[in-house]
Amino acid sequence: MGNNGAGVAEQKAQRVYSALDGFRIELPSWGFANTGTRFGKFLQGGAATTIEEKFSDAAQVNALTGASPTVALHVLWDLPNGTADVPAIQTLEKKYGMKAGSINPNLFQSAEYKYGSIANPSAEIRGMALKHLLESVAIGRELGSKDVSLWIADGSNYPGTQSIRKRIGWMEEVLGATHAALGDGQRMLVEYKPFEPAFYHTDIADWGMALELVRRCGPKAKVLVDTGHHAQATNIEQIVTWLLHVKELGGFHFNDRKYADDDLTLGSIDPYQVFRIFHEILSAEEKDRTDIAFMIDQSHNLKGKVEAMVQTVATAQELYAKAALIDQVKLAEMQQECRLVEAEECFRDSFWQDVRPIVREWRTARGLPAEPLKALAESGYVEKITRERESKNARSVSTYA
Amino acid sequence: MGNNGAGVAEQKAQRVYSALDGFRIELPSWGFANTGTRFGKFLQGGAATTIEEKFSDAAQVNALTGASPTVALHVLWDLPNGTADVPAIQTLEKKYGMKAGSINPNLFQSAEYKYGSIANPSAEIRGMALKHLLESVAIGRELGSKDVSLWIADGSNYPGTQSIRKRIGWMEEVLGATHAALGDGQRMLVEYKPFEPAFYHTDIADWGMALELVRRCGPKAKVLVDTGHHAQATNIEQIVTWLLHVKELGGFHFNDRKYADDDLTLGSIDPYQVFRIFHEILSAEEKDRTDIAFMIDQSHNLKGKVEAMVQTVATAQELYAKAALIDQVKLAEMQQECRLVEAEECFRDSFWQDVRPIVREWRTARGLPAEPLKALAESGYVEKITRERESKNARSVSTYA
Amino acid sequence: MGNNGAGVAEQKAQRVYSALDGFRIELPSWGFANTGTRFGKFLQGGAATTIEEKFSDAAQVNALTGASPTVALHVLWDLPNGTADVPAIQTLEKKYGMKAGSINPNLFQSAEYKYGSIANPSAEIRGMALKHLLESVAIGRELGSKDVSLWIADGSNYPGTQSIRKRIGWMEEVLGATHAALGDGQRMLVEYKPFEPAFYHTDIADWGMALELVRRCGPKAKVLVDTGHHAQATNIEQIVTWLLHVKELGGFHFNDRKYADDDLTLGSIDPYQVFRIFHEILSAEEKDRTDIAFMIDQSHNLKGKVEAMVQTVATAQELYAKAALIDQVKLAEMQQECRLVEAEECFRDSFWQDVRPIVREWRTARGLPAEPLKALAESGYVEKITRERESKNARSVSTYA
Amino acid sequence: MGNNGAGVAEQKAQRVYSALDGFRIELPSWGFANTGTRFGKFLQGGAATTIEEKFSDAAQVNALTGASPTVALHVLWDLPNGTADVPAIQTLEKKYGMKAGSINPNLFQSAEYKYGSIANPSAEIRGMALKHLLESVAIGRELGSKDVSLWIADGSNYPGTQSIRKRIGWMEEVLGATHAALGDGQRMLVEYKPFEPAFYHTDIADWGMALELVRRCGPKAKVLVDTGHHAQATNIEQIVTWLLHVKELGGFHFNDRKYADDDLTLGSIDPYQVFRIFHEILSAEEKDRTDIAFMIDQSHNLKGKVEAMVQTVATAQELYAKAALIDQVKLAEMQQECRLVEAEECFRDSFWQDVRPIVREWRTARGLPAEPLKALAESGYVEKITRERESKNARSVSTYA
């Protein structure tokens, strides 16, 4: 288990450097805004409420971590006027040195979507949803953004109240039409989720359903895995492996959870699971994994927004570095020979290693602060934005009454 | 399985009549108001936004079902001025022929409670929480309401961020002081919940913790079981049985769920479970079950508010009637002799029986409409309140941005 | 909700008669044998230990219910000599008036399968597994049995000990070769299961994985849904709907559970769920559902074997009859108009109806005993077989020491 | 986060040394024997089948790890003649330099216990169970063993088949009588488990029920936490904290799981959870934790028995050492001030540290091999016992047919 000798240390460092140089993880614009639970949200003085504030915060995270040069945009909240807002986004891209990342349509907020959007029994409402999807595709094309990320919140709350079967057909139509509008270099990513906000059936509830739909749409559609969107005890890394195997893995929404879709910071509850997911990706052939979009999708209800995001990216880098240390050749040999305990020890030896010193070295070598959270604290950035934004932000809001 | 002969039919009817005559289930004032998920709420034109509207709706439900003469009140939303609002409530009680039911403090909405209320590390905030609890006790006393219902939303979102142990001690202090203030005939009910809004640890997470706390408080504290507040697969009826056995069962918040705390209408997902819970209560000695408060706690995000409430009470009555039909003597004999299949068939014979005809007869005999949902539709009540309340209610609100 | 008038009653009876006339559910030979948990089994005096005893018991169940003319066979336990045992089975078919049903290979019991069968890293052991599968196909062909039912228990117990990815490829090879051997009129059904006996990853863990594999194999491969093989809270009826939609649903293994794969009798824990599954099937077009094999797969550890099986078939008939009563036209209309409460009430009105009187009538009309469990008790069958088999069966066996 | 300077390193080493010097974890005799699932067991050539072989294997584990000088004994399997076997055990204690640890009665294997042991409706069978418990107490007294460990497998498989309520009373009687027989210095530990082998209700299903029973029994009864015996997502460290708070925590059965009660090796699925449990214990006052029995309860179906046990003890030591590194003073301060991200980083800094080098040093300083698994491999012990025991052990056994 020991890794002694300059040669080994050198080799380890190279693997970590190479892994981190290639590691990018996208920041969600909404991760800097106020969020909460159905019981209310505790507003933060420093929360971003404008798209410019979100770009500013994201740029700060990227400056500290070097891994997050893109910002996922939410159409309804960040481009309420659709493509007409594209120039404003482009101005912000230049001003903050950040690029627009994935485009996220919103098909869950309008009153019309009470009974569904693309799976709504009403053809008129499905048409409205399609229009929003096409606008999102247009935004992506104009911004030169690769991915349109679809989370379809549709479903029903009670047995017997909707035809699960007919709704499949309706979704196929709208998603097919969306796919047809994608330009060269554009993709659509289809997310799945077992429940919430729908509480009896969710129209795209698991990876199998998402896979059927993307297959039906065509080659530019891929599956998006949100790590928090699985039934308890699901083996997520196995799903990742299957999606790699069938070449339909489009990307990830990373977050962690203990119970439901808790949207906690990555690796905060089960870091070993993240390590295993990264291993499945890093042990795939390179061509199979170049097109996987890593994205963060978290809800920082209590933690400071920017602080939580820096912590998340740093943790992701460290867990990715651990996975990069696995001796794939040796592991494969032990697996082939069913030497179980030895294979397991070989595998988790990399998890047990403290990679933080090497990652700090890499950061310094790349002109980044060695300890991003400490650097954030010393920068005074959070205090500054809190002062600037506080007056408009500070109060609590119940979502219940 | 067959129940032939006039004698048997007569006996069955008597059991159902007697059960339904004694069955009361409390309506939550907030069940008539707009609710939603963290992703937004779809506002209903007919939703109640004032306490008078809530009394009006509750009175309508009671008029149709005959089983719900009390309304649970939420202090923050229904009596924002505390005891000063008591006279207004009393006026409504008279006007609508309804009584104030349990008093529900709110310790989760104010910004101060971000890190907890009665378990907050800050003594000052715990003091603020205690003050609100004492105000709630005073309200209950002045209204002649028996129960103060405590749902403590406290907890933490990440391992290591709070001392679980110290927080137990803090809760004990505040709850003890609350108990000391209870008047004669007053009780405090302590609810438990595994998660949400806290996502790593919830300070009162299960019935064992609630039981420890009520024991510590004293004889006027009892445990409140919310049927939606359990880990998947938990045997809830067994918990009910234990609480009956140790004489610490104070009451229920009824609702149903498939996934987390979905707050769906009672019996909508697993009606057999409700039947089993009712059986444990009905098979207990009478003295052990006279003091159990049955209450509804649901969130009607999509269903019509009043409609959902009428449906809920009617379903509760029907499932209660089914449980009342169980032949306890015969069942006990088969259980004692471990005649498994026979005991099971005896038990669920009552579940399979269609009690709706008898329940309809009982309703008619008691001067109630035979079919409450149909009567509601014919009454035009929902149309009327929708017209009256619509202008102020109709829009959708996101809780995310 | 009431169904008054002779016309309605007549119509209802017709629907139930038609449904029950077409309802067949297969009995598992192993359901009559001794079973247990890893902690031991409590042997039953009347348990079947020979294939003839299993045929005898199955024939008895079919005589009482009229719905179960076929017996699923387990190759290793019922045809230990492979095709050489086919003539003996054919003799029993004639003697007991029962037909051989699905053929079930066993790829989990031999010591060689410790690290997997068709997904084992060893090519030699995969070859051994394939040989057994081909033998099973041959048995099916010679017996004129339609389905070969594959439950692949393969998986691993610890992260890192096996290559999940490579094992997919190995499975594809062996299953493809098995498919190639299927004769005209033969099918292979591929079952999925999230865990047990493998405790970290199971190679075919969910319906998505099973679907990928059957697609890869070819048109004679279909997915088999075991109702007990899902993570907690999974919406099983939705999976059924998707499999119907993509025309890959081959059949069911019915049983019930509260926790894991408990193999309890059908409908004993959540009867409403079975009703919902039957509804999805009955609301599909007829051509989509003619080829669905209904099979029982239960483990009667405590209940009497034959008694439990009769109870199961009778319960299945009753729940199927309830689902057949749903007014599909009216329901579809309400669903289309999103009249939620009305749709739900329409849907579960059929669940609440006591169909036992109609089912009894149907039984009598078909020359069957009106109450199968009662008829079993009166027949003295269980006492007879217990006397005959007791001496060899009566002791308890631990599987742990 | 950095640990610079000789002083800090020295301090860290001291904390680890002190923690490991005080860390003991008991080995289960049955962990060296063949085990499996209900689908069969894969017998291992080197598995222990006699009590002497179990002592020999346990002594080997202790020689390599220095942390496991006691062996838990299973009455039925290790002392089939009850107290008459005590002298034989004492001979083995001397021969192998190991002490008898906890005494484990068996109330689940005999055919009489089909419907329960201490909760069986039959007074005669409850009497038989009590007799076995008293024999177990006598064995413990004669062997000078502190704990009698009770796992009560009682329960029922189907709703309605047993009276949950009456069974509570029966358990209270038998457990009370057992408690009365305990000698000075003896304790009884009561374990809880949500399901398996019972599949509808288990009489002692959670920590709340166990706590009620031990309170009723008296001061020598304590609760035993088996880490694998909880519903999915349960916060186990919180339960540990509560049991510490009420001074009723008797000990642990350690193992890990992903799904149900999988009995995998400690920390193999979720090592961060074990770290959190150890933290709750190490942050309690010393007097509260001196009497906590740490025990292993695992089922090594595939891994080599002795190899898995050495791996387990070494992993437990490493995770315990990590927890010992937490800076309790600093953490408490951050928790008090609700500096969430800082507190979390302070907490998991100890988890991220690679303690293996320090633990190796400690081992060497204590005269133990630096790498126990490597030392085991080099010792040839497994090969030796395999040769010696192989002939009688090598075959596979199905528990199903």
Image (spheres, coloured by chain):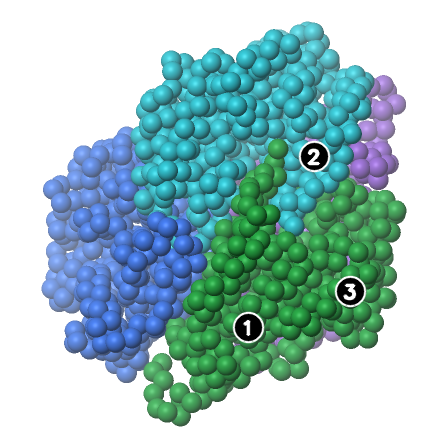
Chain colours: A blue, B purple, C cyan, D green
Give SS at disc 3.
helix
**Residue B101 in the image: above or below residue B177:** above
Q: Which residue is mark 3?
A: D86
- Label 2 to label 3, Cα distance in Å? 60 Å
Q: Nearer the viewer, residue C92 or D23?
A: C92
Q: Is residue A270 visible?
A: yes
Towards the viewer: A229 or B81:
A229
Q: Amino acid at mark 3?
A: Val
Q: Are marks 2 and 3 on the same chain?
A: no
Any part of residue B92 in sight: no
The residue beneath circle 2 is: B318
Q: Which residue is mark 1?
A: D63
Residue at 78%, 66% (x, y): give it: D87
Residue type marked 2: Glu
Disc 1 residue type (three-letter): Ala
Q: Is residue D257 left or right of residue D339?
A: right
User: Chain letter of disc 3?
Assistant: D
Q: Residue at x 64, y 77 (%)?
A: D289
Disc sitting over residue A381 in the figure: none
Q: Position of residue D21 (x, y in %)?
A: 55, 81
Q: Are marks 2 and 1 in contact (CB under 8 Å)?
A: no
Q: Position of residue A289 (x, y in %)?
A: 22, 50
Secondary structure state at the residue bearing disc 1: helix
Q: Position of residue B400 (x, y in %)?
A: 37, 56
Cα distance between the residues tagged 3 and 1: 24 Å
A88 to the left or right of D401: left
